Image (cartoon, helix red, strand yellow):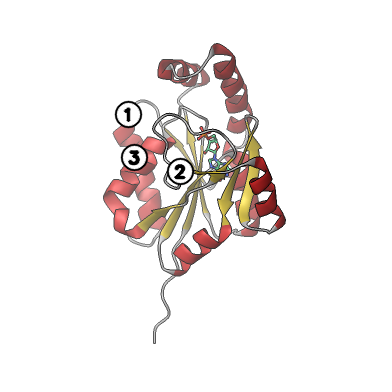
């Protein structure tokens, strides 16, 4: 019997407001049957419209710490005062089933995945400029000024990691152009090109 071909693990990072969620959603729209999104665990409170088990598994800090102790996470990190982690067994099961798995995670976690699974495909989504990122973040209008400033500071730190990713894609306003780049990376790395 031929062994099931394993899926590929894609790790996406990029500062908040850069459009990585939109780009990944487009990839899912086109290649949905080949792709699975990993659902992370987090200690942050759900935002309006977020569903437990779909957007995140919302858990307490105590539960999060228990899971770290059990070695349940492929990676975990603290971001803006909250903990985030990728459930290991879920990801490995999907990869074994031949699904290409997408992780949308911040940079510290991405570096841990790169170290433990060097065969992963790492992609960093960049804004065209820092000023544009600021404009986009403010445009969302969902957060207080203090939070916007904190996110901008975090973004500045995150952007410094971009060269450590295998691919860098600039989302410079033309979403379709950025998507075409992402699509080529996906097809190449899944040997469909
Ligand atoms: P948000 O709170 O806006 O949903 O996410 C904040 C940041 O945490 C984003 O950069 C998001 O990609 C990242 N993130 C979400 N899930 C995980 C995870 O499981 N691990 C890590 N390291 N980062 C995550």
> Does residue 180 appear to the left or right of 134 in the view shown?
left
Residue at the disc numbered 3: 179
Residue at the disc numbered 2: 52
How far apart are the two marked residues, 2 and 1, measured between alpha carbons?
A: 32 Å
Q: The C terminus lies in which quarter of the figure? A: bottom left
Q: How many marks?
A: 3
Q: Nearer the viewer, residue 175 or 148?
A: 148
Residue 43, x across and y down, in percent: 60, 39
How far apart are the two marked residues, 3 and 2, measured between alpha carbons?
A: 28 Å
Q: Nearer the viewer, mark 3 or mark 2?
A: 2
Residue at x 40% of width, y 62% of height: 99
Residue 14, x across and y down, in percent: 51, 35
Residue at the disc numbered 1: 174
Above or below: residue 35 compared with residue 149: below
Q: Residues within 10 Å of mark 1 (few under 14, many from 20)?
A: few
> Does residue 5 appear to the left or right of 84 in the view shown?
left
**Mark 3 residue's CB less than 8 Å from ligand 1:** no
Q: Nearer the viewer, residue 121 or 17?
A: 17
Q: Nearer the viewer, mark 2 or mark 1?
A: 2
Asked which quadrant contains residue 189, the reply is bottom left
Please tell me which of labels 2 and 1 falls first in the chain.
2
Please tell me which of labels 1 and 3 falls first in the chain.
1
Residue 153, x across and y down, in percent: 62, 22
Above or below: residue 164 compared with residue 31: above
Q: Which mark is residue 40?
A: none
Above or below: residue 9 compared with residue 3: above
Please tell me which of labels 3 and 2 falls first in the chain.
2
């Amino acid at each position: 019997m031929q062994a099931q071909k394993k899926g590929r693990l894609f790790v996406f990072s990029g500062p908040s407001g850069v459009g990585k969620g939109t780009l990944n959603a487009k990839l899912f729209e086109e290649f949905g049957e080949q792709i699975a999104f990993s659902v992370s665990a987090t200690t942050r409170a759900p935002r309006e419209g977020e569903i437990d088990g779909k957007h995140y598994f919302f858990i307490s800090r105590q539960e999060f710490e228990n899971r770290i102790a059990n070695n349940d996470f492929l990676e975990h990190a603290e971001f803006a005062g909250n903990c985030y982690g990728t459930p290991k067994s879920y990801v490995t099961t999907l990869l074994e089933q031949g699904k290409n798995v997408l992780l949308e995670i911040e940079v510290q976690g991405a570096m841990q995945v790169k170290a433990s699974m060097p065969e992963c495909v790492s992609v960093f989504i960049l804004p065209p400029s820092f000023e544009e990122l600021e404009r986009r973040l403010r445009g969302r209008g969902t957060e207080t000024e203090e939070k916007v400033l904190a996110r901008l500071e975090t973004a500045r730190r995150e952007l410094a990691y971009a060269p450590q990713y295998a691919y860098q894609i600039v989302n410079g306003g033309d979403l379709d152009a950025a998507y075409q780049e992402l699509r080529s990376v996906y097809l190449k790395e899944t040997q469909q090109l």
